[in-house]
Image (spheres, grey):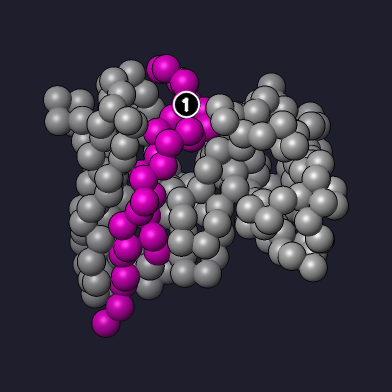
Amino acid sequence: EIVLTQSPGTLSLSPGERGTLSCRASQSVSSSYLAWYQQKPGQAPRLLIYGASSRATGIPDRFSGSGSGTDFTLTISRLESEDFAVYYCQQYGSSPYAFGQGTKLEIK
Amino acid sequence: EVQLVESGGVVVQPGGSLRLSCAASGFTFDDYTMHWVRQAPGKGLEWVSLINWDGRSTYYADSVKGRFTISRDNNKNSLYLQMNGLVTEDTALYYCAKDALHYYYSYMDVWGKGTTVTVSS
């Protein structure tokens, strides 16, 4: 069973800054089967990134994903006010298709 | 428009049973794997279960294995989650989610708004 650990737990940044979120897997994620989701209060999660680095339909290019094996990163190049939310990584290479515990991105 | 609408969430006593439903529309339901994901109050996302396009393959999180059963009715474009032996830790908002790829297990590209299950005496 793959366990995903996200860091930091909370990230405090200002609009316009660059945000870097980390997701580390307890064992290698096959074929970079890793996704990132954004969740705002009272809303369902929204898919941002799949395959570690491919943006989902309609996702702005300020969001980018990278990494392979056990270390993955979500980068938001220039934070906008609507980007402050909770972000989850998820692996879908093998069951159980676990999520990380989340990183809360808050306004500084 | 692709849409998923969950229903069936209620307050139930510990040890009780419940069946959640998810009505799908706007896509060819029987082409896709479907998932249940839950979120306890103030907590993160927890993947619960998936079922493949024809219902022949299912997978479960260890926390629900042996107590929950996922199923689908492709004629009714509906997904279900039968929940037995409920415990307080099952209290959560339960989301239905569509897999992104045809006939495969992958990430989730469409989510419903969720239905709330509360296990309490």
The relative height of residue B89 versus residue B111 in the rendered view (above or below) is below
Magenta span dominant secondary structure: strand
Outermost residue to the left: B75
Q: Give the residue number, with chain letter if any, for mark 1.
A: B100
Residues in magenta, as a range = B92-121
- Rendered location of residue B20, percent (x, y): 24, 51
Q: Residue at x 22, y 46 (%)?
A: B21
Classify residue B91 by image quadrant.
bottom left
- Rendered location of residue A68, percent (x, y): 79, 29
Seen from the viewer's position, the closer of residues B15 and B79 is: B79
The relative height of residue B110 versus residue B62 in the rendered view (above or below) is above
Q: Is residue B104 magenta?
A: yes
Relative to B77, is A99 on the left or the right?
A: right
Outermost residue to the bottom: B121
Q: Residue at x 21, y 35 (%)?
A: B78
User: In the picture, which quadrant includes the N terminus of chain B?
Assistant: top left
Q: Amino acid at mark 1?
A: Ala
The relative height of residue B6 versus residue B92 in the rendered view (above or below) is above
The answer for which chain carries disc 1 is B
- Rendered location of residue A108, percent (x, y): 79, 68
Do we see residue B63 in this rendering?
A: no
- Rendered location of residue A26, percent (x, y): 74, 44
Q: Residue at x 36, y 23 (%)?
A: B32
Do we see residue A6 in this rendering?
A: yes
User: In the picture, which quadrant includes the C terminus of chain B?
Assistant: bottom left
Q: Is residue A5 magenta?
A: no
